[in-house]
Image (cartoon, rainbow, N blue to C red):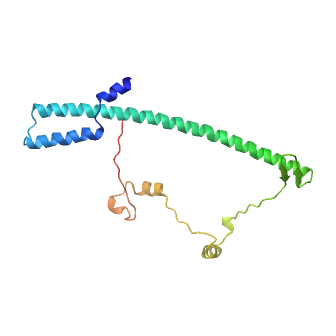
Amino acid sequence: MEGINTLEENKKTLNQILDDYHNIEAKIIENEGEIDTSIEDLLNINKAELENKLDGYEGFVKYLDGQINYLKNMEAHYLKRRKILEKTVNNCKQSMVRALSLIESTKVKTPNYNFSLCESESWSASLDGIDRDERARLIKDGFAENIFKLSMSSLKTHYKSSPEKDVPEWIEVTKKPYIRVS
């Protein structure tokens, strides 16, 4: 009930509080720039409402951060649990492969299942063993891609303290305001 009472007392949204600031600005303009006691009172009320609303937002942000941390911990817990179960399944399957290999049988039939010993292939390539011409041929034939990937963190470190004129024009720096709460 306490949360509901608080909500009823603070019915204004953040946008409504900002609209009130615009209305106060309009009153100041109508009053030819003079801030009289009624405008001063409105400013004080609106400031208090804004401070209260920001406190409420920050409290909610802290609650959500707590939820996020809880969910991250649960993700880690379930990921660990899943990995253990996957490892157990893999170990069981490897034990069955060893058992069939030891009896030198490729097929076993039980009342519930049919087991067949099979073989899979896994291919890999040693990139160090491929010369420049072979790489070009592989790319041309569609067996490889020539990938170029920038290290943005290295570029930022290199150019961060440079004058803006020295930063290449193909680097786009976007600045975005954020709030720091202390």
Q: How many labels does the image show?
A: 0
Quick check: 176 left or right of 73? left
Q: Which residue is painted at 66% across and 39% down in the image? A: 81
Q: Residue 24 at x, y = what percent?
A: 16, 39
Above or below 136: residue 174: above
Q: Is 114 in front, or is 94?
A: 114
Which residue: 33% across, 59% down? 164
Q: In this view, does 47 lie to the left or right of 92?
A: left
Give x and y (percent) for residue 8: 31, 28
* Residue situated in front as seen by the camera: 62 or 125: 62
Q: Can the viewer see residue 182 in this picture?
A: no
On the rendered structure, is 165 left or right of 93?
A: left
Task: Answer whether residue 58 is visible to the viewer in this image.
Answer: yes
Of the 4 image quadrants, the one containing the C terminus is: top left
Res 63 → quadrant: top left
Which residue is at 62% across, 69% downward? 144
